[in-house]
Image (spheres, grey):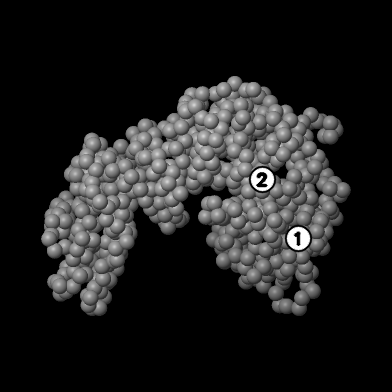
Amino acid sequence: MRESVSVKSHVSTISGRHGGFTFVRLCLCALVLVVAFAAMGCKKPVLKKTPLGDQPQITASDARAQERFDAALDLLEARKWAESREAFRSVQADFGDDPIAVLAELYAARTLLEELGFSAQGKLVSNASKPSLEQATDAFEALVRGRRVDERVKHAASIYLAITWAARSQSERALEQLEKYPGASLGRAILAEDRIPAWVMLSGAFDSATRYEDALEAMAALHEEVLQDLDNKGEGATEKDRQVARLLTLYARGRGFSIAAGAIDEQELQMRYLVSESLFLQAAAGWALLQRRADDELDESTRQALADIYQRSSTAMVSIGALEAAAEMSALMATLGEEKRLVIGAVVPMSGKARPIGQRIMRGMLLGQQAFDFPQDARLTLVFRDSAEDPKENMRIFGELGTLAVVGPIQKEYVEGYASAASDAKIPLITLTTDPRPAPKAADLDSVPQSWVFRNFLHAEAEAVALARLSHDTYQDRRIVIAYPNIGYGKQMAALFARTIEQQGGEVAAQISYDRSATDYSKLARSVAREKPDAIFIPDAGGKVAEIVSYLARENVWGVSGTVRPGTVKTKRRLVHYLGTSLWQEPLLLEQAGDYVTGATIPAWYSVAATDDASKAFTDRYRVVYGSEPSIYEAFAYDSVVWLRESILETGMRHPESVRDALAAPTPREGVTGSARFVPWGEADRELRFVTVSSKRFSPMEVRVKVRAREFLEGTKGANDSSETNGTQGKP
């Protein structure tokens, strides 16, 4: 029986030097927002809600008025403030009795605010002059007080008036303006680009007025709106955009979760928010329910109920980016039931530039914890830690919890620190880094002692070797050209591919490097075409490959199915076998160059196109739970946790050493990332799968290639006895 760990002390510790998901800290950070208006005093709750969002948009009764109004709106969206203002006023003047006229009046006032947004510190700002802001204030006040103004316009005007006060640094007046706003709905009169400032205003006002349900719902809407806006901007998003988004989502999560935990009725949390379609509200409800019961004396049925709540809400927490909340809750869950809990540790990037990858990994791990092909077993709990924290401290915490194994990290700069700490603590570690585990210096590799550290992630070297074997043995290519980027990765892949081809008696006709920053690849294409190759290997990302092969197509070099020998088809084109790395699996390649690379062979550690039962089940389940497509990060994280589940739950292992021995078993493990067997120093013998480009999509191939870990040791020649190719060779 392991020593009991206090919930409060552990959750405090789990937060580490970053402060974790401490709501006090988050709310202090949010004070820079205009919503923290210095007026958080208690106000009387307001009355009945009005379903503004359900009300129809205002339209004109006269088609000419609608046409003129739409033209004015186009000018506004084009940021032609003065022109759009005159156009709206013209609609008012010419169609004063039309319903659209009062909406034109609202937008004419809106143009006076000009560009609205947030500073890098979260303060709401406008680029309008002081006189313009004053004019806007007067115009919105007139609409709010107007007796014959449509209610939809009046409500929108009240929000715009509050925004105007905030832009004029009069926060308390802004709060006062919105404290009686009817419900957590904006209505359709608010312009789409103004919805984020509007939600910021409303959430702060509702919070100040102790309208906590409205405040929580407004913060959920704000969070969703911010993320959607950032997604819409895509690659066009600036660093300031991302900084503001981080600040606003931090505020929404921090204060929203705090409200749920401290001010929302428990029945409302369970019956309304936990089953909401909003992931934010699901996460907030789960957080609140677990926080409230953390220090209670719990019977087994209550512990199980809380575990069910955590399983439901943890995926929602990770989906909305509340990684720290999920981490704290996982630590809390590990202490429920104490000695009955079975813990797997997880070190993932929850801070810094790798945080988005950390979110993906956590998604995959949580799906593995709740793996649908196993009986639900709430006793098995993941406990998350930020990989940037001190490895020894993290392992100490894992040790206190009786952790049976740890998954992570993914960043190569942290691997050795965690590997050393795990070995000292005698807890098995499955890393998710691309760098192969170095083999010990021993004359007989079969006699090396079993390591505590394993690696389960893609292997660039294995891709190069497997592709070379397919090209030479299966496709029987005899003239091969390697076109590679003049960077470390490209040089390494080219060298390994060429070495493997030569070991098998093949010929690399040419190795041609190129500059990835170039915009014209005509010279490269001509150099490749002159060699008249049977196959072309390009170790680069799909987007860059799309550029290069478009130039090759101009030289009449096109892709051909792997089952067809180049030169056997009568055509003016030179048909070649394109060979790529897993980096080729980008939609951009299919969109821009799918026709050029027909039949291309690409290693697929995991592919959403895979049709085997395990991969299809994983992909389908992921789509249901998260509403998006998984990547290799989720797939490898998922397999790592599932393999540990197999070792712990199915074999009854209850000690770290037993789990290590189970991972090191000689029988290969099957997963959504293929088949793998760990060797004593922690690297894996793997069976690689492939996809091909067919009809502008990635299609799974039946071909499989085994690659042994020892083939990548310094000075080791590729052994023929490890190079078998399984399956129906070359057939898509």
Of residues 660 and 316, which is closer to you in this image? 316
Dot 1 lies on which element?
Answer: strand
Quarter of the image with the N terminus in it: top right
Q: Quadrant of residue 140?
A: bottom left
Q: Which residue is mark 1?
A: 702
Mark count = 2
Q: Inspect the image, locate mark 2, and give the three-letter code of the amino acid beneath it.
A: Phe
**Quadrant hosting residue 395:** top right
Q: Residue at x 66, y 24 (%)?
A: 425
Identify the residue position indicated by label 2 in the image. 374
Q: Specify few, some or many for label 2: CA neighbours under 10 Å numbering under 14, 14-19, or 20 or more.
A: some
Q: Is residue 12 above or below residue 550?
A: above
Asked whether the viewer can see residue 622, the reply is yes
User: Quick check: 355 left or right of 345?
Assistant: left
Q: Residue 603's spot in the image, x, y percent?
A: 70, 55
Residue projecting furthest to the right: 721
Looking at the image, tell me whether mark 2 or mark 1 is earlier in sequence order. 2
